[in-house]
Image (spheres, grey):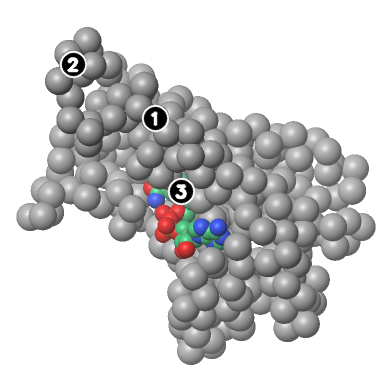
Amino acid sequence: MSKTVVLTGAGGVLCSTLAHALAKNGYKVAVLDLREEAAEKVAKGINQNGGNAIGVQANVLEIKSLQRAKQQVDKAFGACDILINGAGGNHPLGTTSNPFLVAEDLINKNDEFKTFFDLDVNGIQFVFNLNFIGTLLPTQVFAKDMIGREGCSIINISSMNAFTPLTKIPAYSAAKAAVSNFTQWLAVHFSKVGVRVNALAPGFFLTDQNRSLLTTDDGSLTQRGNQIIEQTPMGRFGEPEDLIGTTLWLCGDGSKFVTGVVVPIDGGFAAYSGV
Ligand code: NAD
């Protein structure tokens, strides 16, 4: 019997690609997203390609919304076997304008320019909630039914900035470090009940969120874009499809003795000291 996968944030770039790939590999796929239209669109595309998917509106920060989504998934496909916690992201209010603070930044600066001292607690809380609480709550809702069943597992989406923080994005880096840490904690906690917990740590993937930071209007690289490519031994950005193989491996029996790992998928970025 084919397994049921629930993916949050699956109306987005990376997890919609995973949703399509999982469906192609015979999984029943529940596409959850805050944006109902986006979830429906991805599910429709999967069904048109011969897969089996439903689109479900769900907010990963609201337990009631997740419980409603769970009812829809249970009714359509039965209990969730694999949960992929994909919803996540950054916020401009948790981001500094410059990588390094210099004394001049503090004088005569305009309101647009954000130093560490201007970071807004609301922006930081938004990022911590979305990435960390948004991983914890869906796990509480969907993992309970996994207990005592064979072959169930959870895949969180961390980031390579969890290993070493990236400049300018302290909130997002710390929130993803929390996701990696939670992945290990939960792997241990669930180890006696047969539920494996692992995470992907994607490197730099060119998506709508970061395209304007990394490329210019004519398609060439910004200074930050260039820096990233220079720091990536394999010399390119990731493509969403680069995440598929590791995800299928972590979902399947091939990884049945693997739990508590955070797998970098970053072209060597995290391994490279730059020298
Ligand atoms: P994306 O913005 O394309 O997708 C994120 C999706 O999450 C969106 O469809 C959005 O509607 C949904 N979402 C936002 N808030 C939600 C909520 N409260 N409840 C439910 N859904 C919500 O982003 P992406 O690039 O596909 O990223 C997917 C995951 O991968 C995120 O966790 C992100 O942090 C992580 N990641 C991305 C990159 C990258 O380079 N793109 C790198 C490392 C990690």
Tell me the residue at 22%/33% (across/down). Answer: 111
Tags 3 and 2 in contact by the CB under 8 Å rule? no
Q: Is mark 3 on a helix, strand or loop?
A: loop
Q: Is mark 2 on a helix, strand or loop?
A: loop
* Mark 3 vs 2, N-terminal side: 3
Estimate the spatial distance between the alpha carbons at disc 1 and disc 3, rounded to whole Å.
17 Å
Q: Is mark 1 on a helix, strand or loop?
A: loop
* Mark 2 vs 1, N-terminal side: 2
Q: Mark 3 points at which residue?
A: 89
Residue 187 image position (x, y, % from top left):
76, 40
Tags 2 and 1 in contact by the CB under 8 Å rule? no
Name the amino acid type tagged 1. Answer: Leu
Q: Name the residue under label 1.
A: 119
- For disc 2, the neighbor class at 10 Å (few under 14, some 14 to 19, many from 20) is few
Name the amino acid type tagged 3. Answer: Gly
| The one of 23 and 108 positioned closer to us in this rendering | 108
Quadrant position of the N terminus in the picture: bottom right
Tell me the residue at 65%/32% (across/down). Answer: 181
